[in-house]
Structure formats: structure tokens, C-alpha cells
Image (tube, helix red, strand yellow):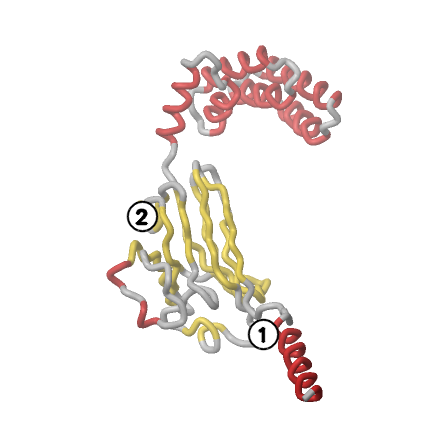
């Protein structure tokens, strides 16, 4: 009886030990959250690796619906409306599917967020938008499937699907100028105007340059030791052709940057002065 009990105990111990074994998964999951425009983009997917296999045959078969990853469904969540394929996409969570091909990929944004390895679960009627994207051949091979947002500007970006020697680019943009301008107007009329932020937006987006210079000057008065404000002020003056004033502002910014041990702004000002 003792022998039987010991055997059962040993078997239970082995079973428990085996249950605790943990190993890396073949296609690790990843969730990326990226600031974009006035909101964020977030994509979740599992990342398969090539492991000597070939695209369009062994992996992501050409002409067939693909979940655009491995394991669970791939999703894209937008916190603020964006434009994809010329269509405005409201804030929300969407499924990201593709139909790969050597010459063209069909990229699908769908209301379905549960389409995995079974293509029969997909319903075309739930499509939000379809985009035809031309794959670009690159020199460096990407072993593990990667989704990233690249070439980001304040209002545009490129959702890139990279695997093997191809990159599939999907342009994304957002229209935010009207909202930002409205917020600037409200801020300037408030008791504590955000002069620096307003002036910087005007400078970077080719708005009223005289107004930008006026606001930079007021921001400098408020924070006279802020070398980053002085630098942007100098840039605005230089853009307006007011070289003497721009040089004075840049020299002031450089002096303050040196006092604060900020070599980046020292170099920025040196370059700006050299270009005047």
C-alpha cells in the first residue's frame, strides 16, 4: 500500500513539474501604441518568423485571405478619426486582414476583430475599407513579421507590413488643422496664453509668420532663460529675413544652452548663425 501511495505521489509531482514548464512561443505577441496626430494608433498581432520558408507559398499564400500575423486576430485601434484609402475611419477597434500578392496586397480594415485562421469566418459585408498596396522590394530581409508606423509627420504616416524582402506601405493621414487653430484662438484669448506652442505651430505650418514672431517674443518675455524658446524665435526671425535680430536671438539661445550644458541646442544655434 505504501508503495502504491508513493508511486501516485511521485506521478503527481512529475505532473505538476511538467505543468510548470514554460518555453518561448514560436510567434510572440506584440502590442504597439503610437502617438499620431491628436490621438494614438495601437496594433496587436502575433509575429511569425520565416525559418527558411517562403512568402506567397509556405507563408501568407498569394491570393488568399490572411489574418496578417499568427495565432489570434490582428487588430488596429484608432483613438481619433483617421483617413485610410481616402475614407474617414472613426475612432474604434478594427480587424486588420490582408490578401497578399507579389504585385499587389489588398489591405482590409474590418469591423470583425475575431478572424483568425478560419477564412470562412470573414464577412466581406463588414469591411470598413479596402486598400490596394504595392509591395516594395528592399535589400535587407526581415526575418520576423513586423508592423510599424513609419515616415511620421504631424498629419501623415505610413503603416508598413514588413516580412522577408518586401515592405507593404499603407498611407494614413489625419485632418487636425481646424481643431488646432480653434484651440490656439481659445488659448490666446485666455488668461494664460500658450504663446510658445501657438507660435511654434504657426512657424512649422507656414501660418502668419508675423503673428508667430509676436507670440515668440511674448513667450521669451515670460521665460527669458528658456533657450529652446529663444532658438525657435531666432528661426522665425531668420525665416522672415530679419537676420540681425535672428543672430542676436540665436546667440542668446546658444549662451543659455551652454549654461545649461545642452550641446544639441549649442550646435543648432551655431548652424543657424552660419546660415544667416
Q: Which mark is residue 181?
A: none
Q: In this orientation, which residue lies closer to the viewer: 133 or 93?
A: 93
Q: In this orientation, which residue lies closer to the viewer: 246 or 259?
A: 259
**Based on the displayed image, in which of its 4 quarters is residue 224 positioned?**
top right
Q: Using the image, determine if residue 153 lies above or below residue 57.
A: above
Q: Is residue 11 left or right of residue 66?
A: right
Q: Earlier in the sequence, mark 1 or mark 2?
A: 1
Residue located at (43% from left, 39% from top): 39
The reply to whether callout 1 and callout 2 are in contact (CB within 8 Å) is: no
Residue located at (35% from left, 44% from top): 91
Q: In this orientation, which residue lies closer to the viewer: 202 or 41?
A: 41
Q: Identify the element where label 1 is drawn.
A: loop
Q: Using the image, determine if residue 144 lies above or below residue 221.
A: below
Give the residue pinned by disc 1: 51
Q: Position of residue 157 (x, y in %)?
A: 45, 46
Give the residue pinned by disc 2: 86
Q: How busy is the neighbourhood of tag 1: few (under 14 within 10 Å), some, or many (20 plus)?
A: few
Q: Using the image, determine if residue 70 lies above or below residue 223.
A: below
Q: Quadrant of the N terminus?
A: bottom right
Q: Identify the element where label 2 is drawn.
A: loop
Q: In this orientation, which residue lies closer to the viewer: 66 or 191?
A: 191
Q: Which residue lies most toward the front here?
A: 1
Q: How busy is the neighbourhood of tag 2: few (under 14 within 10 Å), some, or many (20 plus)?
A: few
Amino acid at each position: 500500500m505504501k508503495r502504491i501511495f508513493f508511486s501516485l505521489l511521485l506521478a503527481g509531482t512529475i505532473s505538476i513539474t511538467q505543468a510548470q514548464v514554460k518555453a518561448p512561443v514560436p510567434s510572440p505577441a506584440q502590442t504597439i501604441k503610437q502617438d499620431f496626430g491628436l490621438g494614438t494608433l495601437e496594433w496587436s498581432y502575433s509575429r511569425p518568423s520565416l525559418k527558411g520558408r517562403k512568402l506567397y507559398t509556405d507563408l501568407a499564400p498569394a491570393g488568399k485571405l490572411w489574418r496578417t500575423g499568427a495565432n489570434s486576430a490582428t487588430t488596429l485601434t484608432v483613438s481619433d478619426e483617421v483617413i485610410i484609402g481616402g475614407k474617414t475611419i472613426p475612432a474604434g477597434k478594427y480587424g486588420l486582414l490582408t490578401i497578399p500578392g507579389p504585385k499587389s496586397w489588398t489591405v482590409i480594415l474590418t469591423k470583425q476583430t475575431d478572424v483568425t485562421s478560419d477564412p470562412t469566418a470573414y464577412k466581406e459585408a463588414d469591411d470598413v475599407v479596402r486598400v490596394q498596396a504595392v509591395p516594395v522590394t528592399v535589400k535587407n530581409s526581415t526575418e520576423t513579421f513586423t508592423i510599424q508606423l513609419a515616415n511620421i509627420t504631424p498629419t501623415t504616416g505610413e503603416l508598413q507590413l514588413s516580412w522577408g524582402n518586401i515592405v507593404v506601405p499603407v498611407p494614413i493621414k489625419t485632418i487636425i488643422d481646424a481643431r488646432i487653430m480653434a484651440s490656439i484662438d481659445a488659448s490666446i484669448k485666455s488668461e494664460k496664453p500658450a504663446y510658445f506652442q501657438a507660435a511654434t505651430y504657426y512657424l512649422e505650418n507656414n501660418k502668419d509668420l508675423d503673428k508667430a514672431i509676436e507670440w515668440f517674443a511674448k513667450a521669451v518675455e515670460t521665460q527669458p532663460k528658456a533657450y529652446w524658446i529663444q532658438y525657435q524665435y531666432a528661426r522665425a526671425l531668420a525665416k522672415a529675413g530679419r537676420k540681425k535680430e535672428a543672430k542676436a536671438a540665436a546667440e542668446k539661445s546658444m549662451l543659455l544652452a551652454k549654461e545649461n550644458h545642452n550641446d544639441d541646442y549649442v550646435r543648432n544655434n551655431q548652424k543657424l548663425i552660419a546660415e544667416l
